[in-house]
Image (tube, grey):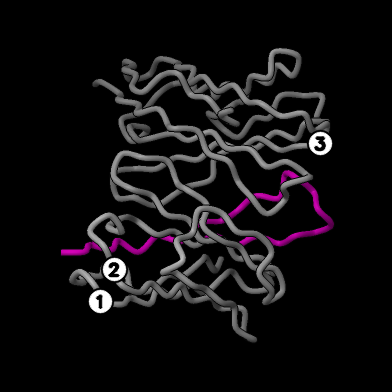
């Protein structure tokens, strides 16, 4: 079974608008971490934000916030006030305590920000 | 702040040749991970090392081997290269800090390997 599912292969958003990138995950662990990475066309992987399974509040980092719904096993990334430089591939990832040395990635969402 | 360093950044090889990719983790990080990302795909975990010992293995072909040295740098050795090995190879490092699952991984810029 897929550990991380990103159902949106590609998305468009108008500059300055907000956008939500979906991510659902599958785990039977009680303790896990969820991450979002950005990969521009240049190829590097840039860490954006994380959420621990025991964190009660949704994580926020500047224009990025994570909409964590534990019961639904979803960890959507919200980007507010989109900028042209946000155009990139976005990967959701998870680490479980019992498979600590593995990072599971989703298939990614390609975000295009239109001027 | 220092980041993960990978060398070379680009590598072109022919089929059946060998290649060695190097990774220098962030200072004081004790864990190194290798990933392979094919065109249009998500990164696939290959192998990881913790304190110079192999800690986990993913979908790494038998033609590949890796090790972590006393100075914590790691090398991924790839032999009998095939066309399908053309990909972006990432190294990442992290600090274990007691199995906290939200210890993030910091990625290097990647090595783009092209096999002709």
Determine whether label 1 and label 2 are within 8 Å by CB.
yes
The quadrant in which the N terminus of chain A is found is top right
Q: On screen, B22 above or below A23?
A: below
Q: Residue at x 65, y 37 (%)?
A: A50
Subunit ID for the residue under disc 2: B
Taking the magenta stretch, the answer to whether it contains residue B112 is yes
**The disc label shown at residue A31, or none:** 3
Q: Nearer the N terminus, badge 1 or badge 2? A: 1
Q: Residue at x 75, y 60 (%)?
A: B96
Q: On screen, A100 above or below A79?
A: below
**The disc label shown at residue B54, or none:** none
Separation of marks 1 and 2 at Cα, in angstroms: 5 Å
User: Do the residues indicated by labels 1 and 3 lie within the same chain of the protein?
Assistant: no
Q: Read off the magenta span.
A: B92-116
- Residue pointed to by mark 2: B81
Determine whether label 1 and label 3 are within 8 Å by CB.
no
């Amino acid at each position: 079974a897929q550990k991380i599912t990103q159902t949106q292969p590609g998305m468009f958003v108008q500059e300055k608008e907000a956008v939500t990138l979906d991510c659902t995950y599958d785990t039977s662990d009680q303790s896990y971490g969820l991450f979002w990475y950005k990969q521009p066309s240049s190829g590097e992987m840039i860490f954006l934000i994380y959420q621990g399974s025991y964190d009660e509040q949704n994580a926020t980092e500047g224009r990025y916030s994570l909409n964590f719904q534990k019961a639904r096993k979803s960890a959507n990334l919200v980007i507010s006030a989109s900028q042209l430089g946000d155009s990139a591939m976005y990967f959701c990832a998870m680490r479980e305590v019992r498979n600590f040395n593995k990072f599971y990635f989703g298939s990614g969402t390609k975000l295009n920000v239109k001027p | 702040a220092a980041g993960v360093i990978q060398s070379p950044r680009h590598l072109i090889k022919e089929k059946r040749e060998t290649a060695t990719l190097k990774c220098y983790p962030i200072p004081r990080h004790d864990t190194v991970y290798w990933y392979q990302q094919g065109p249009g795909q998500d990164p696939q975990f290959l192998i990881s090392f913790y304190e110079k010992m192999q800690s986990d293995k993913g979908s790494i072909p038998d033609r590949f081997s890796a090790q972590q040295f006393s100075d914590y740098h790691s090398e991924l050795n790839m032999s009998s290269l095939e066309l399908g090995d053309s990909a972006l190879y990432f190294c990442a490092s992290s600090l274990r800090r007691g199995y906290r699952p939200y210890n993030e991984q910091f990625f290097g810029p990647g090595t783009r390997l092209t096999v002709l």
